[in-house]
Image (cartoon, grey):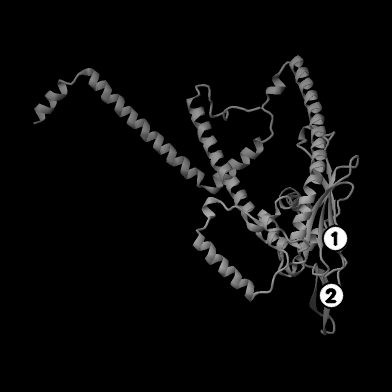
Amino acid sequence: MADMDNKDQAELDPADLEDVEDVEEEETGEDVNSKARQLTVQMMQNPQILAALQERLDGLVGSPSGYMESLPKVVKRRVNALKNLQVKCAHIEAKFYEEVHELERKYAALYQPLFDKRSDIVKAAYEPTEEECEWKADEEEELTEEMKEKAKVEEEKKDEEKEDPKGIPEFWLTVFKNVDLLSDMLQEHDEPILKHLQDIKVKFSDPGQPMSFSLEFYFEPNEFFTNTLLTKTYKMRSEPDENDPFSFDGPEIMGCTGCTIDWTKGKNITLKTIKKKQKHKGRGTVRTVTKTVPNDSFFNFFTPPDVPESGDLDEDSEAVLAADFEIGHFIRERIVPRAVLYFTGEAIEDDDDDYDEEGEEADDEEGEEEGEEENDPDYDPKVGGRAYC
């Protein structure tokens, strides 16, 4: 049997032997690659290695490659000319945003009659007609005649059991509770007050005045404060910083001012009273001290931290103002224009869908990019791929 094996091996074609050797080499290469991948996975699961890698990468961020320093002086002069052109572009962009602000003001006046009518319906100052109440449901929401009749009977039965509600009760409170960014600000003691909120309006600065916008919160008479209007004004700037013109990326909020809330005695929910026991060191007697301290509340929104002229703030104040600016911008851009959709929850679903689509799109683009890099003979993974302008 051994002789037969030797004979078969002797009769093998040399080309066949080369093929066998090639396959063995390829298999060996695959084994090496597999081991390398396993080692990489193990390294990436090691927190110490990851921390060291992150520290190294952080040190590289913003560090010059040395290419600019290697350029001839005459080329550097031309690059400086390009940078001067870029500064001029930044100033033109600032003018563009100023005109956008003017357009916003113009169209705000066109939207306002619709928003006023919305407010009248919410607070029961106007009862919409049958024609205005007609709404064609989506195909998936359409019901059979039998189901419609059954739903109508159920609604009539509920209406008989309940008092006839006026307008749309708790409209703005429901909007706030439906939006995570706003509901995070709400405390249980805020809700009875926000039930009296009737409208929110956005008011833009007048032509020729510094760029700004105000949020106006209108309340019906209530037991908590005497104000019927609470305001929050955001001051904006749309011009490049002389010391750092390339950082300009559109208008930025420079500061904000709130208003004084005239609380009814004993109703100020932004403050709370606490009692502390203090023991006398010498006599050993104990006394109870009453102190008034700040309390978490949505209405702290109307007393933001003061921004000093120097612009220097501690970390806590900076964090509060950053969150404040985000909330103010969100109310202006999303809540006021689309309030009914946040009331029903439809706008929230749309926002979620937008994020999902962006995530999927990003994944697809990443996959395509990786494929392009693998097929690009000039791609060097050490450099990190191409730079996009």
Q: Residue at x 67, y 55 (%)?
A: 131
Report which quarter residue 302 is drawn in: bottom right
Q: How many marks?
A: 2
Q: Give the x, y percent position of residue 11.
A: 15, 20
Q: Quadrant of the N terminus?
A: top left
Q: With 229 as the anchor, is 129 left or right in this view?
A: left
Disc sitting over residue 229 in the figure: 1
Please tell me whether mark 1 sits on a helix, a strand or a loop: strand
Q: With 165 as the anchor, is 47 left or right in this view?
A: left
Q: Give the x, y percent position of residue 148.
A: 54, 62
**Residue type, mark 2 in image:** Gly
Q: Quadrant of the C terminus?
A: top right
Residue 179 can be seen in this image? no
Vertical placement of residue 191 versus 318, above or below:
below
**Residue type, mark 1 in image:** Leu
Disc sitting over residue 343 in the figure: none
Q: Residue at x 77, y 47 (%)?
A: 111
Question: Do the numbered discs 2 and 1 sit on residues whose CB atoms are within 8 Å?
Answer: no
Could you say which is closer to the camera, residue 24 or residue 253? 253
- Badge 2 crowding class, 10 Å Cα cut-off, few under 14, some 14 to 19, many 20 or more, is few
Q: With 139 as the anchor, is 198 left or right in this view?
A: right
Q: Residue at x 9, y 27 (%)?
A: 4
**Which residue in the protein does label 2 denote?**
266
Could you say which is closer to the camera, residue 174 or residue 340? 340
Q: Give the x, y percent position of residue 78.
A: 76, 17
Please tell me whether mark 2 sits on a helix, a strand or a loop: loop
Vertical placement of residue 306 versus 388, above or below:
below
Q: With 274 as the anchor, is 380 left or right in this view?
A: left
Residue 264 can be seen in this image? yes
